[in-house]
Image: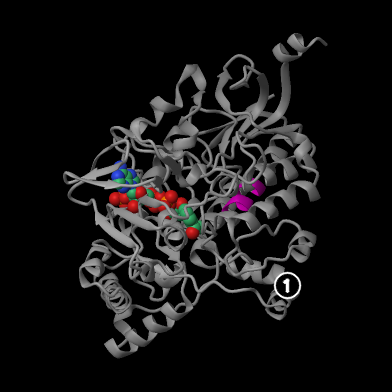
Amino acid sequence: MSPAAQASAVRELDVAIVGAGFAGLYLVYLLRQRGFKVRAYEAGGDVGGTWYWNRYPGCRVDIVSMEYSYEFSEELQQEWQWSEKYATQPELLRYAQHVAERFDLRRDIQFNTRISSATFNDASGRWLVATDSGEQVSAQFVILATGILSAPNLPPFDGLESFTGDFYHTGQWPHEPVDFSGQRVAVVGTGSSGSQSLPLIAAQAEQLTVFQRTANYVIPAYNETLQPEAVAAIKRDYPQRRQASKLFPFAFSFETTGKSVFEFTPEQREQIYEAAWARGGLMFMGVFSDLLLDPAANATAQAFFRRKLDSIVSNPLTAEMLTPDFALGCKRLVVGTDFYETFNRPNVELVSIKHTPIERITPDGLVVAGKEYKVDAIVFATGFDANSGPILRMDIRGRNGLALRDKWSGGASCYLGLMPAGFPNLFTITGPGSPSALSNVLKSIEQHVDYIADCLDSMRSNGQRLIEADEQAEQAWALHVDAIAAQTVFKSCNSWYLGSNIPGKPRVISAYIGWPEYAEELAQIAADDYRGFRFTAA
Ligand code: N01
């Protein structure tokens, strides 16, 4: 076939997968093993997703690596050696690359290829998927393994194009190391990316100015090198430990009293908080059973946090500025190292932009409240258009040409977080309305991929061609997801969980707070002949 004919030929697949991060890799592995003809399309130059793009200094995972890793292969989990409690981005990327090589996945992944559209053909019951280079793919199923945090958000700051220095977004970091030595650097944003990177930037740069809109809760990671004996102990009964971890809310293990704050005296509470602080990590917010449910309980954690912050930050005014003014846990806690200590350095300045936003960017720096801060480089740690963001950057059209953008104009919704009604045979992995970011996402990925693979198997053996979510089932699920969130602190502030970090985005909770019941419910739905889905025979 000539190159031109080759380019215009339509590739036929059983399953087109969008993305080759941790979800896409496991999809390629499992669906290929089950005999489906699959191909993954990946915008990046290699596997790894989040861990391919986010290469900023200090980038690492906030769930312990022995749990934030695949369990689908006992050989893999036995042979892979994590070196630290919380792996760094380079190690996580090497892990993804190892998985791709070990299971020979790359031959079914097309890199440097962005999917621009996917259109369902009502007559043929197949999807036509188009790449940014004009290639066309016909597939029975499309699975969006696009990740939760893969569409970087760079706010349209006035004058950015005039800036004469270098600027970076943490989620699109260069592949070569960036050297800030001798430079005046600005970091905009103090979520996980900003908070993880700024201690390292401060240690290198001549001057660091941090522009903070909302102070966040930063809990120490107390990262450490993993000891071989401790790793061996875990690996001795890894499968049982994995099972036990998945019975915890959020799908990873943590220490908790399992009781209300108010079952303890103030002195006992203080000791428990101290111990939780000394352990560090995300699940500080799980040390009492009601911290995420009861504002009064949460207030005790906030007060403890404020005392800690005051004891670390030497300038009281800076400590005041760094104090969050919302419920602990509402925005994702930041797991950091030396974050507060960094503000005691003489070369670090904190500028609050809470009431006086960045006015504009000039050739030499940033202007806030009429004052110009001159810098040589700007790091935008301004987050992501999460969850539905990467999905809606594609033009996806379902039954009768319905655009997903229109369907989701009031907020994203999928039945069980798996499939939007009106879009037959289109699945999402960790999609809107599934536990996604409010779980150990590696476990959520494996659960979704296993579930979808079983569903496709069942359709094949039952001679079914199409699966689609029932509109009413989807609406009922969305109400349920929202009702659960309304009982927690998660709707009490603005966060990317709600989409409220993106101007104009509908304020809808994107994650289902309900692991492990979620996995049990999905298993029951499958046992009830996939209740809430409709099938069409071949
Ligand atoms: O993004 P964020 P992130 N002007 O949205 C500010 C995961 N992650 O990349 O809070 C000025 O949390 C914004 O201010 P505000 C993790 O799940 C994990 O840091 O909207 N400022 C905020 O301070 C995490 O939660 C790790 O008022 C603006 C910051 O930018 C998620 O990714 C590491 C602004 C954005 O914070 C996202 O984290 C990194 C504007 N116009 C990321 N717009 C681990 O540790 C936004 N901001 C595993």
Number of numbered discs visible in the structure rendering: 1
Q: Which residues are magenta?
A: 444-450
Q: How is the image coloured?
A: one colour
Residue 385 seen anywhere in this rendered image of the structure = no
Q: Is residue 114 above or below residue 245?
A: above
Q: Quadrant of residue 263?
A: bottom left
Q: Could you say where residue 473 lies in the image, as x and y percent from the top left?
A: 45, 39
Task: Indicate the position of residue 29 as horizontal and vertical percent values.
Answer: 74, 44
Please identify the quadrant where the N terminus is shown.
Answer: top right
Give yes or no for residue 118 being in the magenta stretch.
no
Residue 45 to residue 319: above or below: above
In this view, the residue in front, 186 or 407, is: 186
- Identify which residue is drawn at 80% across, 61% down: 75
Dot 1 alpha-carbon crowd within 10 angstroms: few under 14, some 14 to 19, many 20 or more? some
Q: Tell me the quarter of the image containing the C terminus.
A: top right
Residue 200 visible somewhere in the drawing: yes
| Mark 1 residue element | helix
- Name the chief secondary structure element in magenta: helix
- What residue did someone put label 1 on? 235
Q: Residue at x 36, y 57 (%)?
A: 207
Left/right of residue 64 with respect to residue 363 in the rendered view: right
Is residue 449 one of those drawn in magenta?
A: yes
Residue 462 is situated, as x and y percent measured from the top left of the image, at 72, 34
Amino acid type, callout 1? Lys
Image height of 290 relative to 395, above or below: below
Quarter of the view holding residue 411: top left
Q: Is residue 51 left or right of residue 72?
A: left
